[in-house]
Every structure is written in structure tokens, then in C-alpha cells.
Amino acid sequence: MTDQKATLNIGEESYEFEVRQGSVGPDVLDISSLYKQSDRFTFDPGFTSTASCESAITYIDGDAGILLHRGYPIDELAENGDFLETCYLLLYGELPNKEQKADFVHRVTNHTMLHDQMIKLFSGFRRDAHPMAVMVGVVGALSAFYHDSTDITDESQRMVASMRMIAKMPTIAAMAYKYSVGQPFVYPRNDLDYASNFLHMCFAVPAEDYQVNPVLARAMDRIFTLHADHEQNASTSTVRLAGSSGANPFACIAAGIACLWGPAHGGANEAALNMLTEIGTPDRIPEFLERAKDKNDPFRLMGFGHRVYKNYDPRAKIMQQTTHEVLGVLGKTDDPVLDVAMELEKIALEDDYFKSRGLYPNIDFYSGITLKALGFPPEMFTVLFSLARTVGWIAQWKEMIEDPKQKIGRPRQLYTGPTKRSYVSLDKR
Ligand code: CMC
């Protein structure tokens, strides 16, 4: 809280509100008493100026291009740490020491299997189902299998549910992939690290030996780290809103996955790769740039722009470096999609339309190219995002449930429909 007060004048009336100060970032006007005081609501569709909660997990300064998890810059975490360390940090608030890390890795690694009955669920889906549709269904179904961790009032059950989801999400995602390509499921191998095990479950087949390339496993791990959390984005807010009613954590994460699926959110990397492929060759870039600027054309440059970052997305920088490492190892540096991406980035960054609106490449601009090179089809891109974001959703969900001031999320509205009128019987309409 600061000593400052904010005053709102409406005609002759005047209302006072507290100005709250976070540890860093803009001050916040606490208008929670507005309705009680003034019988009025605020109007902010899209939450462009509204803080929906108090959180100590992730901080973003979009103008400066900064992303911190519990205070640690994302580039330091991605370059020096690993995904499970970041998971621990998000969940517990501090980086683990050696013993804590070993214990955490052990707990995740030993919960990777799925209840055998769950595996039968997959065969109920059409083979050509989008794997995100399968994810929404199967993750939601976790609550039908793990009854002993759905009591949200029990701290230990909350943690068991959290560990289960972090551990099982790679298995579910890999099975969704295997099912879509008609290959047998590959069970988790607990002797492999998190990312290697995931690549193994996706790309190994019973007929031959599969060795995970450590550079590619490191790239996969880094992609997971870069996507682990991003404060109150649409899917995280969805998880919080679903959880605010007291819904069980598995159902809440399934809601987050559904929200992430949209092309303006997690679906953007798939859309960005499709767009780069459609552009095809660098000489066609000006034509697409003109379309992106034309207000009568719905086309947007996918992988560009961000609600929060009006500067270079700090994750995009690391992603770009990871893309080059992966393409180098796989000997795909002459990929035409990459040529288009590099050229498009260069031209757009010099273009007044993009410069004046603070539109920079976001993480999705590069992640699609990298995931394609790793062997994933575009439909799997958002699945991988959901796998990685699960820890962020869980950390945010736990923070909300453990907040004694937590209330059900229930926005108000500006009603513009008809006022009260009498029912007209069918023969008179
Ligand atoms: N291509 C062309 N013009 C754009 C783009 C774009 N990708 N993004 C924004 N603009 C323009 C927009 O038309 C508007 O112009 P004007 O001021 O003349 O009306 C201005 O920039 C501001 O855009 P906005 O729609 O008000 O911005 P927003 O904060 O509501 O939208 C966004 C953010 C990410 C939805 C949007 O930039 C977009 O659709 N980008 C493409 C999709 C994409 O890459 N999404 C991934 C986001 S990062 C991953 C994640 O966090 O999920």
C-alpha cells in the first residue's frame, strides 16, 4: 500500500481508493470497493488495464522485454538451469539445493506412468482428432482416475495432484501423438531425464533402437523452460477462474488447455509455421506484409506482436539461438522456411507499421520452426506448449487456492440487451 489515494469524481460525487504498490511494476488502484461505494462498475473487456489477482510468481515488463520467474531472468534459467529446476522454482518459490532437486526429480520421474484404464480412453477418439482435443479430454479425465488427489482443501493432495500432472503430461502428450500417427504407445523410461524421456516416448518404435540426441534433448528442455509460465495470460486466467469455483485441479488444467488451443494464444506457433510455409519464398514477403497492414484484410503476421511485450520478447531471443543449434545438429540450415523467417523478421523490424506499434517477433515465431525440425507435426506444437505451461498453471492455481482472501471470480457486465418485456405467445409472433 502507498500513502497515495486515487480520487474518482463523477459529477458532484467523489470516491477514494487505495493505491497499491507491487515489489516492481506499475502501481495498482484498488477499486474493489467501487460498486459498494458508487453503485457503478468499471468496464475493461480484454482486461487491458485490470490486474485480476495478486501474484508473487512471474513478472513481465513488456516495454523493457523482461521476464522474471520468482525474480530470476528467463534467459539465466534457460541457459544455466533446466526445466525441472524451473518447475521447482515456480512451485516452491526458490531454486532447489542439490538434495531438494534430486528429491523433486525423483518424485516427478516416478509418477510418469498412466493408470492402465486411462490408456484405453485414447482408442475412443478418431485417429484424425486434433491432439489438443485429445489432451482436453484425457487431462480432464485424470480427475476420474486419481480420486485421492482432488480434495483441494488438503495441502498434501494439492501437491500430489501437482506432481502427478507435471509427471504425466509428457506421457499423455506423447500418447496423443502416437495415437494420431497410428504407432504403438511407448511407455515412459524412468532412467531418462524429463526431455529425453519425452522425445523417446514420441519417436521410439518397438522395431528399432532409438537414441536420444543430447543436443536435441537440451533444446526440448529449453523449449519447455521458455514456456513454463507467463503470468496472467488467457489460459492461466482461465485456470484461475475455473479453480476459483473450487473445481478440482485436473479439471482446471483441462480448461487451461482448451483456452491455450486458440490461434491468438498457444496455437500461434502452428499458425506461424503455416504462414511461413505459405509465403514459401522471400520474394513473396512484401505481398504478405501489405496484407498484414491492410485493415480490410483479416490476415495478421502470425508470431508477431504481443499483448504485453511491446519490445523484443526475451524468450524469442533464446528460441532463435535454440533454433540454430537444432538446425545445425540436424544439418537443416538451408531450410527454406527458415530463410523466409529470417528475411521476414529483418524486413518487419525495419518497417514503420511494425515499429510504431511495437510489433516484434514473439516466441512462437521461432518455436514452430524448431519443433518441426525436431520431427513434430504442426498439430503437436500447442500440445508441447500445454505440457510445458502445466507447471505455470499449477503454480498459479495453488497460489490462488492458498490465498486466504480468495473469492470466486465473477466479472460484471455492461448490459446492452432489451429491457424487461412481456412474453409473446407463439401464435402472435
Ligand atoms: N500483424 C499485423 N498487425 C498487428 C499484429 C500482427 N501480428 N498484431 C497486432 N497488430 C496491429 C493491430 O492491427 C493494431 O493496429 P491498429 O492500432 O492500427 O489498429 C495494433 O497492432 C495493436 O494490436 P492489438 O490487436 O490491439 O493488440 P493485442 O494486444 O490485442 O493483440 C496479439 C496481441 C498477440 C493477439 C496480436 O499481436 C496477434 O494477433 N498476433 C498474432 C498472433 C500471435 O503471434 N500470437 C502469439 C502471442 S505470444 C504467445 C502467447 O503468449 O500465447
Image (cartoon, rainbow, N blue to C red):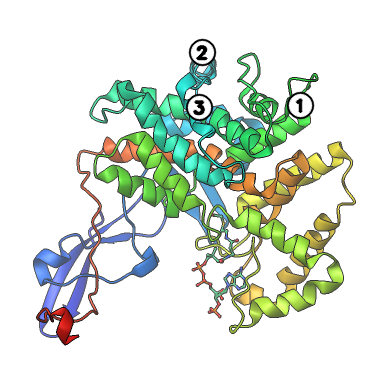
Residue 383: percent from left, percent from top: 57, 43
SS of the residue under disc 1: helix
Q: In front here: 81 or 103?
A: 103
Circle 1/circle 3 CB separation < 8 Å: no
Residue 84 in the image, given as x and y percentages of width and height = 55, 27
User: Viewed as shown, does residue 30 lie left or right of 288?
Assistant: left
Mark 1 vs ligand 1: CB under 8 Å? no
Q: Mark 2 is on which residue type?
A: Glu
First-in-chain label (1 vs 3): 3
Task: Kindly report which numbered mark, 2 or 3, lies closer to the viewer in this rendering.
Answer: 3
Q: CA distance from mark 2 to mark 1?
A: 24 Å
Query: Could you say where residue 193 lies in the image, as x and y percent from the top left?
Result: 64, 21
Q: Position of residue 115 (x, y in %)?
A: 46, 20
Q: Residue at x 23, y 79 (%)?
A: 417
Disc 2 or 1, which lies upstream in sequence? 2
Disc nearer the start of the sequence (2/3): 2
- What residue do we see at 51% from left, 40% from top? 135
- Taking the spot 58% from the left edge, 47% from the top edge, the residue there is 130
Query: 347 above or below 142?
Result: below
Is 253 situated above or below 106?
A: below
Q: Decide: is 181 above or below 429.
A: above
The quadrant of the image that shows the C terminus is bottom left
Outermost residue to the front:
427
Residue on which the image places disc 3: 120
- Label 3 beta carbon within 8 A of ligand 1: no
Left or right for 108, reference 211: left
Mark 3 burial class by Cα count in 10 Å: few <14, some 14-19, many 20+:
few
* Residue that label 2 marks: 99
Q: CA distance from mark 2 to mark 3?
A: 37 Å
Ligand 1 visible in quadrant:
bottom right
Q: Is residue 119 visible?
A: yes
Residue pointed to by mark 1: 214
